[in-house]
Amino acid sequence: MKKYLTISFLLLASLIFAQDRTLVGKITGAFDTAGLPGVTIVVKGTVIATSSQADGTFKIKVPAGSKTLVFSFVGMKTKEVEIGTADIMPIEMEPDVVKLNEVVVTALGVSREKKSLGYSISEVNGEDVARSGEQNVIEGLAGKASGVQVIGSSGTPGASSRILLRGPQTIEGETQPLIVVDGIPINNTTEDLFQSDPEGGVNNSNRALDINPDDIESVSILKGPAAAALYGSRAGAGVIMYTTKKGKYKTGLGVTYGSSAEILQVSKLPQQQNTYAQGDYVNGVPTYITAGQGPDGRSLGGTPDSWGPAISSLASQGVKKYDNTGKFFQTGSTFTNNLAVTGGTETTRFRLALANTNNTGVIPNTSLKRNNITLSGEHRITDQLSVNASFNYANTATQLPQQGSNLSGVMLGLMRAPASFDLSNYQFSNGYNRTYNDIYDNPYFTIYKNLFNSTVNRIITNLGLEYKPLSWLGITYRLGVDHSSDYRRQIYAISSLGDVNSTGNGQVGYATANTLQVYSDLIATAKKSFGENVHSSLSLGNNIWNHSYQSTLARGSGLTIPDFYNLSNASQLYSSNREEYQRSYAYFFDANADYKSMVFIGVTGRNEWASTFGANNNSFFYPSIHASVVLSEMVKLPKWFSFAKLRAAYAQSGTAAQIYSNHTYYAQPSFADGFTNGNGFPFGGMNGMGVNTTMGNPNLKPERLTGQEYGMDMRFFEGRLNLDLTYYYQLSTDVLLSLPIAPSSGYQFIYDNAGELLNKGFEIQAGGSPVKTKNFSWEIALTWSKNVSKVLKLAPGVDAYPVPGGAQEAYAIAGQPYGVLYGTKWQRTGDGKLIIDPSTGLPYVDPQNGVLGNPYPDWISGIRNTFRYKKWSFTFLWDIKKGGMMWNGTYGRMNHIGTSKESEDRNRTFLIDGVIASGINSQGYAIPTSTPNTKPVSGYDYWNSYKGDGSNSALENSIQDGGWVRLRDVILSYHWDVKTNKYRLKYIDFTVTGRNLLLFTKYTGVDPETSLTGAGSNTIGTDWFNNPGTRSYLFGIKAGF
Amino acid sequence: MKTIKQIVQVGLMLLLLSPAVSCKKYLSDVEVNPNKPEGATSALLLSTVEVGTFDNYTGSCSRRCAVLTQHCTGVLFYYLSINNYSILEADVQKDWNNLYSGTMMNAQVLADTYGNACPYYRGMAKVLKAMNLGLTTDMWGDVPNRQAFQGNVNKTPVFDPQQLVLSDIQTMLNEAISDLKRPSSSNLTLPGNDDFIYTGQIQSWIAAAWVLKARYANHLSKRSSSQSALDAISYLDSAYANGFTSSAADMTTKFGAGTTEINQWQSFQNQWGGYVKMGKNLVDIMVANADPRLPFYSDTVAGGTYAGAPPDNPAATASNIGAYPTQIHLPLVSYVEAKFIEAECQLRLGHINEAAAAHNLAVKASILNITGATSPVYEAAHASETAGSITLAKIMTEKYVASFTQVESWSDWRRTDLPALVTNPKGVVSGIPRILPTPRDERLYNPGVHLVENVLTHVWWDL
């Protein structure tokens, strides 16, 4: 095979035509005499091409009989010029205000004219990602494109961000898009390596964190199956294509250096009361109870509650008020340095970038440190053949705080702490955790002693070959490797109760994970024109993907020597490992044709084989078809109506089954009962195995996502106003579920294709330039998206399905939107009145759980205003999320234990509005009467039970509107062209950015852009003592040489 | 030009198609799961079934029963709900899962896969399955058995009536005993250290199987007062004849210190300390009798006294659980239980001398077992019953005290109403629950379910 390839290359390379003439010229802008560099000049109908020099001049040899030269340049109207008799050609190019020739990166990294596409692709400028101040290139997309929902999980360093395109397209599988960098899919998993509770542990990073935002040139977002179908069973959730910055040909050597400093603050916290001391109602009397040091040197006694007497009444006992929360958080900082060297000759271009990021969090002793080295280059060996390669090394080190449902959780310890207890005094003299009761770790102890570190070393590299043997034929080969190793350490110091069995005896875990992805594409593209008007192209390709993963975990518990964390210090050891190997290959075609650049049609197909398909299923085919019609070229529109295009697309993509689900396996069992971790193996020095609780299924198929989309792209007044509308309807069928079955069958689950899920919605992208003069301009860009998801069916007998990998509060329920919050609610009358127990004055909890709210927003929108005045630019982005309910578990629990600000109002009775019950029927339901409740409840019962989350409370109390209006970024920048040529300095950009400066929300907890389970889980909308978000101020300077 | 085109085309085709040759292998090379095997061994399965049995008997089911029988009081959250008799279908799901798919399924697989070559393993598997099925039917009444554990073959097994389940348990134990009586030479492999309970001592298994037969025979006390007693006594005689003559023969848990082998009462105390406290009913009985076992059962409160929490005032200030429930060996089938069954059955048959003698032996064995010493004072008062003094109330009260952590206590109370328990007036139902609600996943996914929603429903043997 290699031989054939070599022969073909040799033969084809010799095919160089005789050349007759040399044309020269200078290209300028229409209103500008300065030369335009980098304009592509092609001899029409040939592969002969060149580009203009820095001063705009060009030189091109044209064969005899050539008729036309084509000049093209981004942002300019493409110009075709007849070759006359003159050898010198002055060329004027006009700005393309309507942007008809915009090019966009599509599936498999192929650049296409935007107007030829029958589906919608959102684009984000790399600069907008870099200037957002976000260190995570996923979070950096928030608010910037329609159809894109970014769900940040916390403001702590390295916290993960989840991203959804047009909503969740599957139930249990991956709902996040495939991330592709320069044509190569990369790993963006969010992994817990310590087998933590998904609601506890730390907020693990999603691995797109390893990408330096400053390296991003542009982002193309393939939202629906039509755009993404060529990625087959990995495209079900869409694809995000990042294109990195490259050097440019013929630009000489350039250097840019950028540096920024950022100050971060906690943006929002739940309010705490500071009037009442720690304690409980003992025989109805608030009694001060606190912890001391027990005989074993650890904290002993105390109570989780702050139902004690007023702190002021305890002055004689030396009890006073402490502002624990105010004292705890610090001002965080981020410093970044970016040095880039770019260069380009006639045949070679390169870019070398070095970057360093150093972020310390608002929670003390937390950090993100990242170093990136990026080298990319391309060399044109001949006019037909070029090679390109890139190498990206990232070193990402994080020190992360404990979070969530976790006895060491930072916010858990902090928000529950009574105001009468001084947290900052966090150690006893023996170094043990000093806390206000003997359950939760002191948050200071956790941040200084219970350290979690992760160090990732990662290399993403690729090699590409482009060969154009014939004017009508191009071959592209691309090979990419993404390899990362992650080394983590998790410490629970002696006396911390965060360890696996909460023994407080100290525990240290070490985990490593290696991930390797190898990806290759071979694409041959042939072009053919039929007459003057019909142009077509056909690509055939092959694609191979190989993924391997290995992780090991070693954990030692029962530590003896304090602060010594080698496993040799442990009296008990536990270890485990996991390996995954996955492969797929596919053949595909991509056929396109257009008529007079007015009507475009494209068809793609991909046939895929994968190791995860069930043994009884060999391969799957994913088709797509899309068409667009440029109306403005077909019918005469009014002059102000500059451009109109209609588009439509239909496609299928898929989501692959989980690995290793074809067979029934044996496994080491664990007999957890929902409270303890249960018993397992090793046990008594022996091993044990049992039949897995999930039955294997050889008939698995990939899930199928069938999407239709229709859209319209309109531009008015020479592009001063533009509007792009999209409607889509995406149906997921054969959705894979771990279906619960009757456990009396011997199994608890069978993994099968069963569900159906619908997502449909509208997307609007609009922009306008209300003012545009030489010195001043004002631009508005708006994105608006609404997605409605609905679980159409689950499986026979299955009406409610817990969204896996996360909080038990989120469910897929037939007939409801995906991922609704589900739990206990109050019993109500038909017209919604609470039914009250006349003996207690408290409402009854419904014995059956119910739907409490949809955590997905009604709609989301981003509105950016940009003002430019001479060299000044001022831009700000409003980010609006309408609706989206949150389970604010923090609120319920703080009410329950009496630390919430609201619960300060406790020395009176409350009357709960509702009707009283006359009794309870046999099903456990209260029988309502029409008599209004007159029985008041005490302040304690009101907050502890009714507004709290105790045993007779309903989860519905803690469901709150998580919508917001936020000023996501405000950026003021000044571009200074340095006139003097000293130090070869060309320009300096000064930038001041504010992140999240304003936040309007009804949510009473932390910043509602939060997620307990992080990007690694399909659950969103849960907050259980989540670590808070941040606002920040960033100062940047960038110099170009 | 044409030739060149053709060469390009061929080259292209080869390039595109060449991987197809090795495609199948390319994929099949990675289809084997490196993380989990597709088979196990008899030893691995036996260890699993035994550990599962430890969890089922002394884990969550044991804590729930302790709250219902007022050995303990649930003070916080979920355990406060149990204390208030609010037991929901989702709350019992994991226990059901551990019983069915975690334990009994593996016992079934062990018996079916290895039984012919290794009858001892099959016998042990059947004893363990019988005792787990017994636990299941005591808690839920009608439960699946005959059609259960068939995986894909039958995903919706019908619920067998409890009467049938109990007779199947007897049959299962008979089959187990006959397997265990085979010569060791008829076994391809023999159990050893993989048998945590008896380290492969087959005689001990036979004896324990007889006690189990007695236990489930005695459960029919309300249904057939004398026949159940006659059966139980005859089974106990076989147990004694096979060496079940002291606490040394007990079938107990074998917990350890490692994170995966920790006692579940201990584990619960570590992770959910304060959720469950000592119950007033048990503590008061023991305080009144100056019971030497009390310091082992319970911690003291400030002032060095013992304070159980009453169900209607679940105060956080009550005594915590003591050291006994958290120890390595908790009884599953015990000599103490055998003697109490004997005492109860003899009394039912009017054999009051035998009843008193068995009662006295049971109490003494319990004291010795728990405290490590005899207690002449306590034994003089409570283990010196005679034909004239013995009553069912005394037997059942002493058994109640001796059976702390044992789920059997709940059955004993339901059968005899002894000792008298006062219903928590704050309970959401008007009595102490007598059955657990059908687990949610059985209700949803098994149309053959015999649905129980009302926790005051009586199981068949309780009628």
Image (cartoon, rainbow, N blue to C red):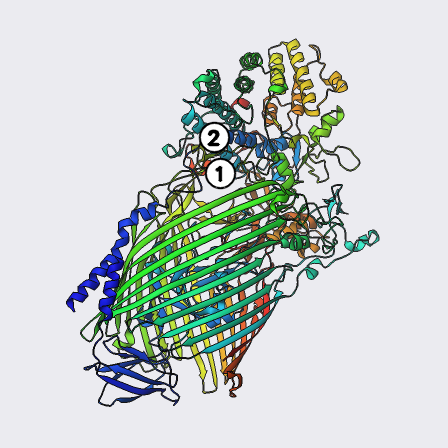
Q: Please state if A917 lies on the left or on the right of A191 as rendered.
A: right
Q: Please state if B258 lies on the left or on the right of A741 as rendered.
A: right
Q: Please state if B101 lies on the left or on the right of A1004 as rendered.
A: left
Q: Nearer the viewer, residue B134 or A920?
A: B134
Q: Position of residue A1041 (x, y in %)?
A: 49, 80
- Is A471 rendered above or below residue A405? below
Residue A803 visible, this orientation: no
Q: Quadrant of the C terminus of chain B?
A: top right
Check if mark 1 and mark 2 are on a common chain. Answer: yes
Pick whichever of labels 1 and 2 is earlier in the sequence: 2
Identify residue for label 1. B440
Q: Position of residue A209 (x, y in %)?
A: 50, 61
Identify residue type, mark 1: Arg
Q: Nearer the viewer, residue A632 or A504?
A: A504
Alpha-carbon span between mark 1 and mark 2 = 28 Å
Subunit under mark 1: B
Identified at 72% across, 37% down, the residue is B318
Q: Position of residue A881 (x, y in %)?
A: 50, 64
Identified at 55% across, 44% down, the residue is A846
Residue A896 visible, this orientation: yes
Identify residue for label 2. B45
